[in-house]
Image (cartoon, rainbow, N blue to C red):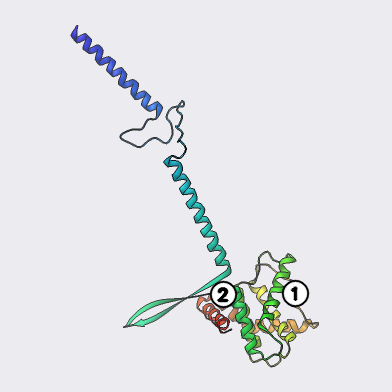
Amino acid sequence: MKISRQKLKLSKLQYKLSKSLVDFVNNNLISPIGPQAKTPLSPTHRAQKQPFGSSSAVNNNDSATATKIADSTNDKQNSKSNKKISANCTTKVSVRGDMVKRRTIIQASTSELLRGLGQYISKQCNIRHFEPAQLVIWLRTVDRALLLQGWQDVAFINPANLVFVYMLVKNMVRNDATIKTVEELQSVVLTCLYISYSYMGNEISYPLKPFLIEQDRDRFWDRCVQIVNERSADMLRLNSSSTYFTEVFAELKHYALDG
């Protein structure tokens, strides 16, 4: 009798253990050995809802807030990068027989380079009644007109393109005694701007009218041919050589600082 009772107790104990094991699997309880399962093993299982103010909700809110802060920071950095451009120049310096690389970073905004270009023209061309602010008006007027007329989706006047314009203008106005009036100077600058649009712009072609202020179109096209013949190699070099671009960039910014 005692043996049969012990067997009966043992069988009941085994039955309870097997039943608790089934409940453990179906209810997806927390195992003391491994981590909690992410998906229920039973179709009748329902995940427990976290109460308001639980640690998981706080963590989710914190992660969402951190994501928003990171996104806003990235947006601010992108907007700043649109306004300014940096030029990196790596040079080698000899120190006690060893070659050490030194990187120079030059940064300038569109308004600074516009001011520098105006100051350069003002110093090179001895023209009465010319102010550096007039140059800004000439370039901005053409750029705005092309935007409003639908010829371009993004403004062309930015630091990189201004470096290109400066390279062309420098060749045309330097020691040029034929430029005696503000109108002649404007014609030369707008011709350089037209070549810059044609070479650096995103569109296939641009209308001639915003760049033309003189009646004789032959003079305009003669200047275009002259610029292409004299500066074609430098145009390619400016886009292929970062060192040359940095030199021209730094030169233009120097005039902005002098003003």
Displayed quadrant of residue 234: bottom right
| Name of the residue lying farthest toward the left | 2
User: Could you tell me which secondary element the residue under label 1 belongs to?
Assistant: helix
Residue 12's tag is none
Residue displayed at 52% across by 55% down: 71
Q: Is residue 163 visible?
A: no
List x then y, in percent, for residue 135: 68, 80
Q: Is residue 1 left or right of residue 36?
A: left
Displayed quadrant of residue 240: bottom right
Quadrant housing the N terminus? top left
List x then y, in percent, for residue 107: 52, 74
Q: Label 2 sits on what residue type? A: Asn
| Name of the residue lying farthest toward the bottom | 177
Q: Nearer the viewer, mark 1 or mark 2?
A: 1
User: Could you tell me which secondary element the residue under label 2 belongs to?
Assistant: helix
Q: Is residue 230 left or right of residue 219?
A: left
Residue 210's tag is 1
List x then y, in percent, for residue 180: 72, 91
Read off the residue under disc 2. Answer: 239
List x then y, in percent, for residue 111: 61, 75
The relative height of residue 239 versus residue 35 in the rendered view (above or below) is: below
The relative height of residue 174 versus residue 114 in the rendered view (above or below) is: below
| Name of the residue lying farthest toward the front | 53
Judging depth in this view, the residue of 145 and 112 nearest the camera is 112
| Name of the residue lying farthest toward the top | 1
**Is disc 1 in contact with disc 2, using a CB cutoff of under 8 Å?**
no
Label 1 vs 2, first from the N-terminus: 1
Q: Label 1 sits on what residue type? A: Pro
Quadrant housing the C terminus? bottom right
Q: Residues within 10 Å of mark 1 (few under 14, many from 20)?
A: some
